[in-house]
Image (cartoon, rainbow, N blue to C red):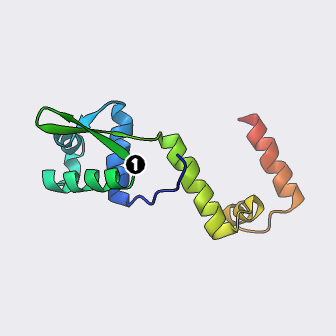
Amino acid sequence: MGTHIRISDAEMEILRTLWAAGDWLSTGEVCTRLEEKGWKYKTVGTFLLRLQEKGAVEAQKSGKVNLYRPLFTEEAYKHSETEAFLRAVHGGSMKSLLAALCGGPADEALLDELERRLKEE
């Protein structure tokens, strides 16, 4: 995933559905899997079209319907989103991010503790 793509919350629901499927899905299949949202077929179709225009999904014609699949993995998107957040909010500083997560300055003792915990996992 080369360029960071801005995805709305609703579009993210669509992407998560496609990632979970691991295969091509039609608009109707996406609707069925997101039935609890109460979204109409046309609404889901609009979200899929937007995602296609953004380069997040690709479409393939199958008879009279379009099938969709994501063009990148969930992990690749998370990495891209995290990198963009780190640059925009923390000026690219991991130390600043850690300080924000810990609710205070990231001193050497805190960084050592975090490193120890990460090695345990």
Which corner quadrant of the image does residue 99 belong to?
bottom right
Taking the image as shown, residue 118 lies to the left or right of residue 25, namely right
27 over 46 or under it: above or below: above
Residue at 27 percent of width and 50 percent of height = 48
Position of residue 42 measured from the top left corner of the image (x, y, whole percent): 14, 54
Position of residue 110 measured from the top left corner of the image (x, y, whole percent): 82, 56
Amino acid under disc 1: Ala
Which is more toward the observer, 69 or 82? 69
Taking the image as shown, residue 17 lies to the left or right of residue 109, namely left
Dot 1 surroundings within 10 Å: few (below 14), some, or many (20 or more)?
A: many
Quarter of the image with the C terminus is top right
Taking the image as shown, residue 72 lies to the left or right of residue 104, namely left
Residue at 22 percent of width and 49 percent of height = 36
Residue pushed farthest left? 64
Position of residue 2 measured from the top left corner of the image (x, y, whole percent): 55, 49
Q: In this figure, which residue is indicated by the disc labeled 1?
A: 56
Which is more toward the observer, 71 or 7? 71
Position of residue 70 measured from the top left corner of the image (x, y, whole percent): 38, 41
Q: Secondary structure at mark 1?
A: loop
Residue at 46 percent of width and 41 percent of height = 72
